[in-house]
Amino acid sequence: MFSGSLCTGTSFLCRLLLIAIATFVSITNTSGIGVDTITPAHPLFDNGTTVVSAGQTFVLGFFGSGRRYVGIWYYKVSVQTVVWVANRGRPITRGRGILSLAADGTLTIVTDANSTVLWSSSSPSASGSLSSPVAQLLDDGNFVIRESGSSSSYRLWQSFDFPTDTLLPGMKLGWNLTSGLNRNLTAWTSETDPAPSGYAMGVDLDGYPEIFLWSGTTKKWRTGPWNGLRFSGIPEMKSYDRLSFDFVVHRDEVFYSFYIHDPAYISRLIVNQSGITQRLVWIEQDKQWNPFWFAPKDQCDNVSPCGPNGICNPNESPICDCLPGFHPRNPSNWDFRDGRDGCLRNTGLDCRNGTDGFTTVVGAKLPDTSRAAVDMSLSLDSCKIMCLQNCSCTAYAAANISGVGSGIGCITWTSDLTDLRVYISGGQDLYVRLAASDLDLARAESKGSRKNTYIVIAIVVLAVTIILLSCAAFVWRKKRISTSITGNNSFSEQYLNEENEGQDLELPLFDLGTITDATGNFSIANKLGEGGFGPVYKGQLGEEQEIAVKRLSKSSVQGVDEFKNEVVLIAKLQHRNLVRLLGCCIQGEEKMLIYEYMPNKSLDANLFDKARGALLDWRTRYNIIVGIARGLLYLHQDSRFRIIHRDLKASNVLLDKDMNPKISDFGMARIFGGDETEANTRKVVGTYGYMAPEYAMDGVFSVKSDVFSFGVLVIEIISGKKNRGVYNSSRQLNLLGHAWSLYKEGKILDLVDESVDYSFPITEVMRCLKIGLLCVQNRPEDRPTMSSVVLMLGSEDAVLPQPRELGFVTNRGPLESDSSTSKPESISTNHLSITIFEGR
Ligand SMILES: *[C@@H]1O[C@H](CO)[C@@H](O)[C@H](O)[C@H]1NC(C)=O
Ligand SMILES: *[C@@H]1O[C@H](CO)[C@@H](O)[C@H](O)[C@H]1NC(C)=O
Ligand SMILES: *[C@@H]1O[C@H](CO)[C@@H](O)[C@H](O)[C@H]1NC(C)=O
Ligand SMILES: *[C@@H]1O[C@H](CO)[C@@H](O)[C@H](O)[C@H]1NC(C)=O
Ligand SMILES: *[C@@H]1O[C@H](CO)[C@@H](O)[C@H](O)[C@H]1NC(C)=O
Ligand SMILES: *[C@@H]1O[C@H](CO)[C@@H](O)[C@H](O)[C@H]1NC(C)=O
Ligand SMILES: *[C@@H]1O[C@H](CO)[C@@H](O)[C@H](O)[C@H]1NC(C)=O
Ligand SMILES: *[C@@H]1O[C@H](CO)[C@@H](O)[C@H](O)[C@H]1NC(C)=O
């Protein structure tokens, strides 16, 4: 228990001493005495002393000016952010506070002015008599009372069970049903007063559990039930590799929790003083908390603005509407846009005759489930039957939509449907029971032009139909003119059916005739180049659209698998720095990919060509680097999959008419599962000169192998030279080796392409070069991730780590098989992609 002010000087010895003490303390922590604990013999006094968790993540101490409180805040966050308060409503106003642990394991706050106990942890349960208790602040921010010296997880008391306004990762919001403990969040009264205000958030156990935000005794906002993926009322909620969520409904507990998988990522969920629940994320550069998400957001988020059986849609005016087959209960109020009275059924349900049916509300936030019943074992079909058989059932929906299809599990409502709203995306289907006569009406209504969504759907359907019809007509004509082109169609049909099953492939299928016409029968004049898997042609579709057609050679290495891989992958990727796939064509033996046309060709055709290279000024080069970095970051992190490109190189980066880079050629990309980070492959594919050492040698690839290729690209872009050439004949160094030796000699700027104007911004160029060197570090763990690369590229004052000595820099690598330098005219036509099969 020492304060940070012990060492006021910056003396090195002093710091060393502190480190030594800290190390000693953390070693002795196991025996229960140290800076992260309070024991009966060592209480915490309000004299600047604090308790710091072993990993220096959280601090416990006294805070507040005038009125003092005991609380926990982050150690590393420079803006003091209190995440827990002990004596919320009972500040210390006179005398000095003391937080002490009694021998029976109770924590109390008293003052040295009088003997009033301001706060105490709930008295220990009957079983809990500890022989030597200790209160310890853990690294997750939990302050626990346990037996000293025991490693058992038994905790007499923990602060996580008594949250204030903040939910930290791993904390549970909800109930222990065995003990009846209800953990909920309550907002502070004001910025400086942690006393509980009327705004609270907690799990409501009635019916099918949901989380409610309360303002006093009124419900303010509802998350909706958990649907296996997210809360039904938070369509934007999505687990990803940094943050994941869980909602557990068990016999003995019901709770919500979130988890952080990246220790550098600091995030918390709070109820703030305005009664808004928000997730905040700490941004170190800006030294501030960034709102990541919040609720309620719009009028429809308030609990039931449209009353029973109304639907709220914030994009409509008025926002309230009745469910199909219902009419406003109070038409005059309804006209004044007060929808709270809700709607009534036009025709009563006809229970016994079995003529009732269901109308579907698409994209719904499920109505309040406080009085709904759930059966997780039922399928959606059985759910419907069950609902029809029970006279009081008014609606049903799937309880878990995380699997394939429309979902499983069954929620049924037997009351009016309240607090129902719809979303443009992310909602789910709700099936509302109607009498037969209303059902026809509802059908007619949904066919009508009332809803924008329906119009959009209709237009899309119409457009698709027209396109299909004209394609069909075209094919038909084509077939009559020449019967020789079309071979056996069964492959394409079979292939597409296969694809359509699991992954909805929404990709236009071009007819071979159209493509033949567009490319002038694949004329040599239209040939743009020859990729690893076959020639690429330029084509013209109609008046405007220029396309690039990759025709896979029949004998190509890219088999059906790679082809499928590429099609499925690219169809799902959308980013301004990735080349866009317009469609594909599969007919007989022919397999073709149709891309948007890039008038400025590939990066290598520009970079390594004297005349064109001179046109690449520094700004353009910098934009290309940043663009590639963003595209790659998207592949690695931001798209729905974790994708490793595996063959990033100058010829796979295309430039559009404004010289924006677009990454292409995903034939070798691998999709990684959520938590898979590296893989081993039997088939090493890629291009020599861009391959990371661990990949070339051992076939181990990860996102960091792409980072390596990116680093090579950065250095090539700045130097205008190929990594494969020899740049220092006396030492046989390749470009990377050359760059490293210049860097060591402090002459790194000599590397910059002569054709770049000398007025380039030196610091920016240096930064890019240094990032390039960091990316080609020998060990994958020394290379930055693409997200830090993008950050480093973007911020002028980022402090970059020092690159280490590069290995693997001579041109005589163990796998070098081709040392010829490229001929100028074959620049983008012959990218040597080597494929090495490990014999197994
Ligand atoms: C705080 O008070 C305790 C107990 O009186 C004492 O051991 C400790 O040295 C004090 N710390 C400071 C910084 O004054
Ligand atoms: C003891 O001190 C507390 C906190 O300063 C104060 O609220 C309380 O009124 C005091 N009690 C007495 C009897 O003075
Ligand atoms: C719930 O409370 C009971 C009684 O205090 C305890 O034994 C049990 O471990 C708790 N359950 C969980 C999951 O914490
Ligand atoms: C929050 O929990 C406390 C006890 O744990 C309970 O008294 C209070 O009613 C709860 N509030 C809400 C809104 O659930
Ligand atoms: C509460 O959060 C909302 C949404 O982020 C924000 O607009 C509002 O200013 C916050 N209120 C306070 C008092 O911080
Ligand atoms: C059931 O149908 C019969 C005729 O098919 C009709 O006479 C009767 O009124 C219906 N029952 C109800 C409750 O609507
Ligand atoms: C109808 O459903 C309600 C609520 O789930 C249930 O209480 C009731 O027993 C059911 N009635 C029949 C006949 O199954
Ligand atoms: C929902 O369904 C998925 C897949 O079918 C399953 O893994 C998951 O455990 C289910 N969740 C719940 C809460 O039943």
Image (cartoon, rainbow, N blue to C red):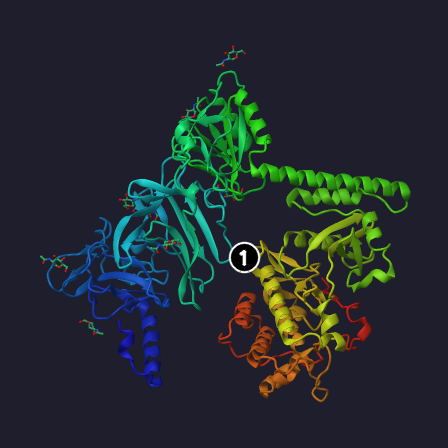
Q: Which residue in the structure is indicated by mark 1?
A: 675
Quarter of the image where one finds residue 692: bottom right
Q: Residue at x 24, y 49 (%)?
A: 127
Q: Is residue 207 above or below residue 49?
A: above
Is 313 located above or below residue 576 in the figure? above
Give the position of the C terminus as an image quadrant.
bottom right
Considering the image in quadrants, where does the N terminus appear?
bottom left
Dot 1, how many residues are within 10 Å of its Cα: few (below 14), some (14-19), or many (20+)? few
The answer to whether residue 290 shows anywhere in this view is yes
Q: Is residue 816 left or right of residue 408?
A: right
> Between residues 372 and 620, which one lies in front from this camera angle?
620
User: In terms of image quadrants, where is residue 217?
Assistant: top left
User: Where is residue 662 shown, x and y percent of the image?
Assistant: 67, 63
Look at 76% across and 76% down and name the residue there.
Answer: 611
Helix, strand or loop at disc 1?
A: loop
Q: Position of residue 815 (x, y in %)?
A: 72, 74
The answer to whether the residue bearing label 1 lies less than 8 angstroms from the nearest atom of ligand 8 is no
Is 707 or 415 nearer to us in this picture? 415
Q: Amino acid at mark 1?
A: Asp
The image quarter in which residue 223 lies: top left
Q: Nearer the viewer, residue 448 or 178?
A: 448
Is 297 on the left-hand or right-hand side of 150? Answer: right
- Is residue 693 in view from this perspective? no
Q: Position of residue 294 (x, y in %)?
A: 42, 51
Q: Position of residue 455 (x, y in %)?
A: 61, 37
